[in-house]
């Protein structure tokens, strides 16, 4: 049975927590607190913010100037040995997987860990003025999507469902911050501890 979700920040060693386009420590805690408050009623379990950051230097690829999200997931899984716990890491680092130019996030399908990046969710990345409300909306959608993967859900064919695949912010903005009835049912079964009955 899934008991709780922990939210955590991913940082870089030897560098300040703040920098161009990055939040201050207080901003991070505020953002994660807001996200935890939004996720708790959706999954009907407790959500906590961890104040310590995950060190991601080993996931950096200098040739791409990006961070390998799968390596970050492995770090998260190694540090998360609590049964029934999900860890969602949030970072401002630009993430990638080898077959794609970038990813907004990645999760272990049916696993315990997920990571999402604010880097390309920010309007500033596209040369537009900052929009805090839109950033929070995109962050919530991506968090629900990646956590859905940890509950065993795959991408949904319903473009309005939060589990629909989105490889651009325009697609992310089109979908809702809700699970379709089919995906909601699968999440509810996973939360009840019935992961083996999920159809994929």
Image (cartoon, rainbow, N blue to C red):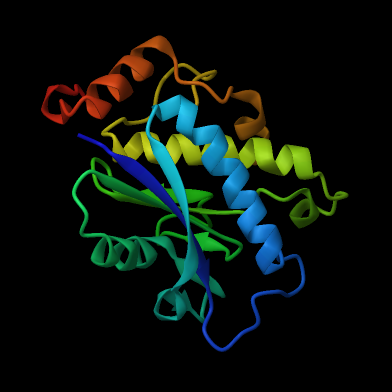
Task: Name the side, left or right, on which 49 lies relative to 21.
Answer: left
Q: Is residue 151 above or below residue 183?
A: below
Task: Name the side, left or right, on which 22 lies relative to 164.
Answer: right
| Identity of the residue drawn at 76% across and 38% down | 133
Residue 64, percent from left and from top: 53, 73
Which residue occupies the extreme top position in the image? Answer: 181
Can residue 166 be seen here? The reply is no
In this view, the residue in front, 139 or 128, is: 139
Which residue occupies the extreme right position in the image? Answer: 129
Q: Is residue 57 above or below residue 2?
A: below
The N terminus: image quadrant? top left
In this view, the residue in front, 94 or 42, is: 42
Q: Is residue 10 above or below residue 87?
A: below
Residue 23, percent from left and from top: 71, 64
| Identity of the residue drawn at 11% across and 28% down | 196
Task: Name the side, left or right, on which 20 lies relative to 67.
Answer: right
| Identity of the residue drawn at 22% across and 43% down | 84
The C terminus: image quadrant? top left
């Amino acid at each position: 049975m899934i008991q709780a979700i922990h939210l955590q920040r991913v940082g870089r060693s030897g560098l300040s927590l703040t920098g161009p386009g990055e939040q201050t420590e207080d901003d991070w805690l505020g953002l994660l607190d807001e996200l935890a408050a939004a996720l708790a009623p959706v999954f009907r379990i407790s959500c906590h913010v961890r104040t310590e950051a995950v060190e991601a230097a080993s996931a950096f690829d200098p040739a791409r100037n990006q961070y390998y999200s799968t390596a970050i997931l492995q770090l998260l899984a190694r540090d998360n040995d609590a049964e029934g716990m999900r860890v969602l890491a949030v970072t401002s680092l630009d993430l990638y997987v080898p077959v794609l130019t970038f990813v907004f996030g990645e999760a272990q399908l049916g696993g315990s860990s997920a990571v999402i990046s604010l880097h390309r969710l920010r309007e500033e990345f596209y040369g537009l003025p900052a929009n805090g409300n839109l950033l929070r909306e995109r962050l919530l959608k991506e968090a629900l999507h990646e956590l859905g993967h940890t509950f065993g859900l795959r991408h949904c064919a319903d473009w309005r469902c939060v589990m629909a695949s989105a490889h651009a912010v325009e697609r992310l903005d089109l979908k809702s911050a809700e699970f379709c009835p089919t995906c909601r049912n699968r999440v509810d079964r996973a939360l009840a501890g019935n992961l083996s009955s999920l159809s994929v």
